[in-house]
């Protein structure tokens, strides 16, 4: 692989293959494969994000998915009612 600077400032460098073997390896690098592999750093990032969102709403960090969805739905309904 080789890195090529992106033309837009602030964007990361592009990673380009140097041969067909590298191109084949690069094609494996998809979000789907990343999520299926679920590396520890990705789990940690999701956990930190979930905790930050819970803190922003003033909720406990250990709410289950169903409780979070119920609370978000209630907030959405309250907002929709306030704008009607």
Image (cartoon, grey):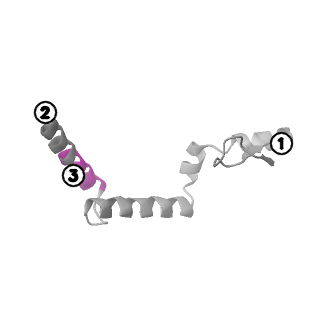
Q: Nearer the viewer, residue 28 or 59?
A: 59
Q: In which quarter of the image is residue 57?
A: bottom left
**Residue 36 left/right relative to 18:** left
Which residue, given by chain and number where applicable, does mark 3 sit on?
71
Q: Residues within 10 Å of mark 3 (few under 14, many from 20)?
A: some
Name the residue: 68% across, 43% down: 28
In this view, the mark in front (2 or 3)? 2
Residue that extends furthest to the front in the rendered view of this protein: 9
Name the residue: 64% across, 47% down: 11
- The stretch in magenta equals 65-74
Q: Nearer the viewer, residue 15 or 30?
A: 15
Query: What secondary structure predominates along the stretch shown in magenta?
Result: helix
Name the residue: 18% across, 42% down: 79
Position in image of residue 38 (x %, y %): 54, 55
- The reply to whether the magenta stretch includes residue 73 is yes
**Real-space Cα separation, disc 1 to disc 3, in angstroms:** 49 Å
- Are the residues flagged by discs 2 and 3 in contact, CB closer than 8 Å? no
Q: Which of 28 and 51 is in front in this view?
A: 51
Position in image of residue 81 (x %, y %): 13, 38
Q: How crowded is mark 1: few (under 14 residues within 10 Å), some or many (20 or more)?
A: few
Which residue, given by chain and number where applicable, does mark 1 sit on?
21
Position in image of residue 83 (x %, y %): 16, 36
- The reply to whether the magenta stretch includes residue 62 is no
Which residue, given by chain and number where applicable, does mark 2 sit on?
84
**Residue 36 left/right relative to 79:** right
Dot 3 lies on which element?
helix
Q: Tell me which numbered mark, 2 or 3, is placed earlier along the sequence.
A: 3
Dot 2 lies on which element?
loop
Q: Tell me which numbered mark, 1 or 3, is placed earlier along the sequence.
A: 1
- Classify 19 as above or below 48: above
């Amino acid at each position: 692989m080789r890195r090529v600077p992106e033309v837009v400032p602030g964007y990361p460098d592009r990673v380009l293959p140097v041969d067909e073997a590298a191109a084949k390896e690069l094609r494996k690098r998809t979000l789907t494969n990343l999520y299926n592999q679920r590396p520890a750093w990705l789990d940690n990032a999701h956990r930190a994000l979930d905790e930050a969102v819970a803190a922003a709403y003033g909720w406990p960090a250990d709410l289950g998915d169903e409780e979070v969805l119920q609370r978000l739905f209630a907030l959405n309904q309250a907002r929709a009612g306030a704008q009607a």
